[in-house]
Image (cartoon, rainbow, N blue to C red):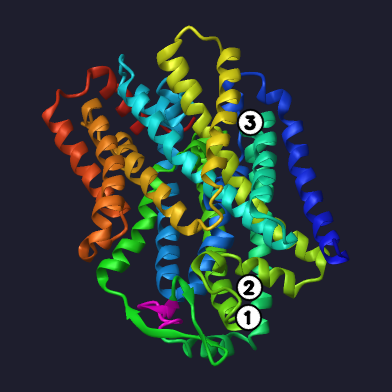
Amino acid sequence: MNMDKIQITIAMSIYIATVVGIGLYYAKRASQSSSHYLIGGRSLGPWVTAMAAEASDMSGWLLMGLPGVAYWSGMGEAFWTALGLCIGTYLNWLLVAKRLRIYSHVAGDAITIPDFLSNRFKEDKKAIMTIAAIFILVFFIIYAASCFVGVGKLFSMIFNTKYIYTMIIGALFVISYTFIGGFLAESASDFLQGIVMFFALTIVVIFGITATGGLSSMIDKAKDIPGFFDIFSIAQPKTADGVQLVENNTPAFLEAINLDWLFIISTLSWGLGYFGMPHVLVKFMAINKSENIKFSRRIATIWVIISLAAAVIIGITGRILYPDAFLTPSLSENIFIKMSTDFFFSLLAGVVLAGILAAIISSADSYLLIAASSVSKNIYQGLLNKEADDKVVLRVTRLTLLVISLVAILIALDENSIIFRVVSFAWAGFGATFGPIMLFSLFWERTTRAGAIAGMVTGGATVFIWKLLLNPLGGIFSIYELLPAFLFSCVAIVIASLLSKEPSDEVKKEFRLVKNYKAV
């Protein structure tokens, strides 16, 4: 290992040691109860809530996936995706955060999303809880696998080692401190990771624009590639067997593809996913006071806007500076790593690259923890062993976390996975399964248990059907599966609710109490 790699290793090791230290610090508090382990006893402050929510949301997708899309095909898809996410972030904090914090407390002091939905409709037979837990388990395993792919790509490129080994080592690191410290460790480390991610993105984008000759020069050079710097077009690399061709020492592009309204609406629909993201929603439930949410919303919105804009610009500047460095969509996701190692002296590069590691583990820990809680709290205690005490639930949570992690590692063995595409499918799954029912549960008194079940099943099933069966047909079916699945879920909720018996007086009374609640 040369001196440059040694310095990078030192910087990243210090960061890793810090995160492990956070896990050890919170280990005792995490073991007090399943509530402390899974939701931190509702004790998060506004800064930690905001940063933890956004850091756990973005993952390696922000520093690898999104820049990779911009590097490969230009502004079009990346811009509209980022815009949809900015809008979705703001609306989720504005509409959902405060009411969910209050409602989850009033409805049996729920500490997981399946708990909340089940308590909201006062169900005796835990159908809603079971369905919600199963969908969470499936989609979070996919999500966690995408994170492990990211950490494997990061370390294999930095240290020129075999992907499979670095992926497994990175996964074991995430598993270890999540296993020990639970939600408080995850949230505190996510706060730190949000700061590191923000620093990494901003410093790389500043150096990237400077290296291209300034903002005007960057824009002019980007426009030389057909459709590359046009939000209404997608650049189309000329490929053979999935690899971009290089002609006369220049990467070849075909004529740009013009975006139609259907593609733009479809891509903007990424923002709808926020209403159904359990790892974000649980942060709303965990804030110490509902009146702190307004301040958290401002922090989160500013962080997201700047971070997403920086990620897209990094992809654009990366293509200008390294036009033929990455000739496949999968390899394009390494552009942030390439720029970091080239721009900075090794120790600083290690700090910047820790931003990628921060993005990855800040999401993976949330995914693993919530997936494990869906099994232990909602399936094991909710259905199989209702008399299980809190210590047993805590042990089952940790055991489940290990099993889920193993499955995610097995899925992540394919190093050719494209992080952006893997995340987009899981994002659609959560958005369509939980987004509509969360909104209807919080804001429509007439929503019934039957409507909740119909909405979740319709949304989740539509994502699979649209993606696997209809999307390959092209045309209107080529739109992002989240949009039709979200709409079909809404329709299913309304129809099933109107056709079923009205909610009980107890459910209505609780809904009105929450509606008029001032603070918790």
Q: Residues within 10 Å of mark 3 (few under 14, many from 20)?
A: many
**Near-viewer residue (480 or 142):** 142
Q: Is residue 191 above or below residue 309?
A: above
Residue range of the region highlighted in magenta in the rendering:
227-239
Q: What residue appears at the point 50 percent right and 56 percent down from the top-left corner? A: 417
Disc 1 crowd, CA 10 A, few/some/many (<14, 14-19, 20+): many
The residue beneath circle 2 is: 205
Residue at the farthest bottom position: 248
Residue 230 part of the magenta-drawn span:
yes
Q: Give the quarter of the image for residue 46.
A: top right
* Callout 3 touching callout 2 (CB < 8 Å): no
Residue 182: image tag = 3
Question: Which quadrant of the view contains residue 41?
Answer: top right
Structural distance between the alpha carbons of marks 3 and 2: 34 Å
Asked whether the residues under the numbered discs 1 and 2 touch, taking CB atoms below 8 Å apart as contact, a structural biologist would say: yes
Residue 307 coordinates in the image, percent (x, y): 57, 63
Q: Is residue 486 in the magenta section?
A: no
